[in-house]
Amino acid sequence: MTFLTKSTLVLLAALGTTAIALRAADVTENFEANCASCHGKDGKGETKAGRKAKVKDFTDKAYQAKFSDADAMKAMKEGMKDEAGKERMKSYTDKLNEEEMKALVAQIRSFAK
Ligand code: HEC
């Protein structure tokens, strides 16, 4: 009985660690696949497309303070347009679900730490 309980715990712990590792990889993968072309793998936006789109530096705390988590969710859901209505960033509702978007907000926040 004791053996069973212990091995169950060990198994659960192992499964838990794997789940966490998978989640973290998913966020990074989502960011690199959808966002890094403009925002850069490091969030600085120093890519060709990033310079063209005039993205700002996610490692800059002052910039991060200018948008809320809700603004970030809105940007991913509705995209961003300039004053003339020209698209600067597209909507990602066809690629990412609510959960994935929330994880991306946390990923973006982590660039400025
Ligand atoms: C085509 C280039 C491009 C891609 C790809 C892109 N963005 Fe953006 N993003 C922009 C631009 C441009 C801005 C606006 C910068 C500014 O404030 O002037 C922006 C702004 C943002 C903001 C700030 C929102 C606000 O309210 O100020 C967030 C958060 C963001 N992007 C997240 C993402 C995430 C997450 C992805 C991937 C799912 C992504 N972006 C992909 C171009 C891009």
Image (cartoon, rainbow, N blue to C red):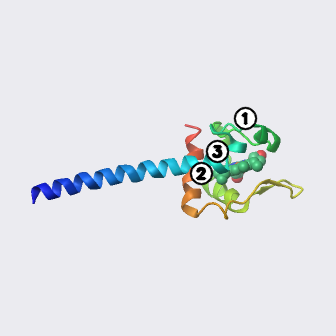
- Which of label 3 and label 1 is nearer to you? 1
| Marks 3 & 2, CB-CB < 8 Å contact | no
The residue at which mark 2 appears reads as 30
- In front: mark 3 or mark 2? 2
Sequence-earlier tag: 3 or 2: 2
Q: In the image, which disc is placed on residue 113? A: none
In the image, what residue occupies the spot 57% across and 48% down? 29
**Residue that carries the numbered disc 3 in the rendered image:** 65
Rendered location of residue 88, percent (x, y): 80, 52
108 left or right, relative to 63:
left
Q: Point out the residue furthest to the left here.
A: 1
Residue 112 picture quarter: top right
Secondary structure category for the residue under label 1: loop
Q: Tag 3's secondary structure?
A: helix
| Whole-number angstrom distance, CA of label 1 to CA of label 2 | 19 Å
**Circle 1: residue type:** Glu
Say few, some or many: other residues with alpha carbon within 10 Å of mark 1 (under 14 / 14 to 19 / 20 or more): many
Q: Position of residue 70 (x, y in %)?
A: 63, 58
State how far apart marks 3 and 2 are (Cα). 23 Å
Q: Which residue is drawn at 79% across and 38% down?
A: 51
- Closer to the N terminus: mark 3 or mark 1? 1
In terms of secondary structure, where does tag 2 sit?
A: helix
Badge number at residue 46: 1
Can you say whether 99 is above or below 48 in the image?
below
